[in-house]
Amino acid sequence: MNFYQSRTFIGLFASLLAMGSLTACASGTIGSGGQKSDFQAVTTDAPSNNLCGQLTAPLTEPEQEYAATAWQYFVNNRQPDTGFINSANQFPSGTLWDQGNYLMALNAVRWMGLIDQGEFDLQLNQFLTSLGDLPLVEGALPNKVYNSATGEMVDYGNNPTKKGLGWSALDIGRFLTALHIVRTCHPQYDNWISGLMSGWQIPRSIKEGQLYGAVFKSNGQLLPVQEGRLGYEEYAARGYELWGFEAPKALETEPMKLVNVSGVKIPVDQRNFEETDANNYVVSESYILEAIEFGWDETLAEYAEAILTAQENRYKETGHLTAVSEDNIDQVPHFLYSTLYANGTPWAVITEENESHSELRTLSTKAAFGWYYLFPQKPYTLKLIKAVKELQDPDGGGFYAGLYEESDEINAILTSNTNGLILEILYYKALGNKPILDVIEH
């Protein structure tokens, strides 16, 4: 069970909850066993990094409304006893990736003016306090998933487990990037955050220059498992690099091949499902995250433009607007990878187990937002943003995950991933369409 499967199972239970099959727990106590923090709460009197607030392209009125809508998801899904965020609406479970989404959203709304420094400090102080109390797998690294209401390690059914399930190196990489951006924009928190990270045994998630998650075998032993394929592997390794942890093989694009998809050669990881039991899917999100946080180098820029062009070509071929990524869905099987390519098949729509569900392909809201703001001059990306900008919960709970291609019905599930990425994208835009780290560190 790897990083992606954790998102699959959380999506399943969140969808059941939305249908009234589960009841969410909204209170409890934080579990013990993690790294306790000796740092005191930080106050509003401390200085921040003003570079983070130099918005050279302030949000338009519609964009301010987008930001307010996306932020409401986090208002509604922040747990009062821990400060952690639910991965999906009103379901008290979350991964480290989801908490990274929240930190990026919290930083974005602070600088875009949706909250003031006092509210930011209140939320971050509680979050970091709870983070310091998290129980860790073998006392080393965070579990794959936690009860967001209590801070307990849980399994994929949100049932407490004392030893945990293992850890995800990709989640850790995402979270390290978010923490680094927070400590850079708010240096008054640097000592506290760095102290917390010193309590994690991060080198245990790196082996021979690659990223390694871990799972428990049937005999109870913890088994290291290489994590990541082209796109996410490089993105996560960049997060490690920000903290001085090197994973050079994970940063390489090899082993890679170019595959023709809708008349365009796109990059595909050569490690396949049959040999590794891991999918080599190509989706939009990893390229979007890399662009808005780190910036693309020349090679990644070429790959990303090819990936966007292939999706535009599919629209020309089929008449269906195409912006694909992985997403929770509001029906069985609850989480799908709508891909450009996976396991030898162009435009595959699959589960983690490589089961096909092409009838449930979606136009992804987060992918449409991302491609529009990365390529705002392209007529195709304007079509994308127009198709998704109104996909908002009428009760003000955030943006829905997308539209089903076949039925044209809304994929009416609310998640931290969709709404967090939208807020990140809007912050990138407000910084003048410049990578966040380029702006705040220079």
Image: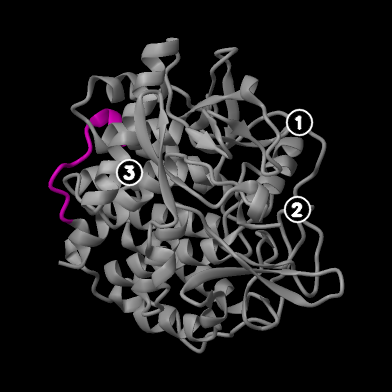
- Extreme residue toward the bottom, this view: 38
Above or below: residue 66 compared with residue 139: above
Which residue appears at 25% of the width and 42% of the height? Answer: 302
Instruction: Name the kind of residue labelled 1 in the image.
Output: Met
Q: Is residue 63 inside the magenta stretch?
A: yes
| Closer to the camera in the image, 85 or 351 | 351
Which residue appears at 38% of the width and 56% of the height? Answer: 253
Asked if residue 122 can be seen in this view, the reply is no
Task: Determine crowd level at label 2: few under 14, some 14-19, many 20+ residues with C-alpha closer than 10 A.
Answer: some
Mark sitting on residue 19: 1
Q: Is residue 122 inside the magenta stretch?
A: no
Secondary structure type for disc 2: loop
Name the residue carrying label 2.
25
Instruction: Name the kind of residue labelled 2 in the image.
Output: Cys
Secondary structure type for disc 1: loop
- Say whether residue 237 is left or right of residue 301: right
Residue 28 percent coordinates (x, y):
74, 64
Q: Main secondary structure of the magenta part?
A: loop
Q: Nearer the viewer, mark 2 or mark 3?
A: 3
Give the extent of the magenta segment: 54-64
Instruction: Name the kind of residue labelled 3 in the image.
Output: Ile
Residue 132 percent coordinates (x, y):
56, 78
Q: Earlier in the sequence, mark 1 or mark 3?
A: 1
Residue 151 percent coordinates (x, y):
67, 67
Name the residue carrying label 3.
425
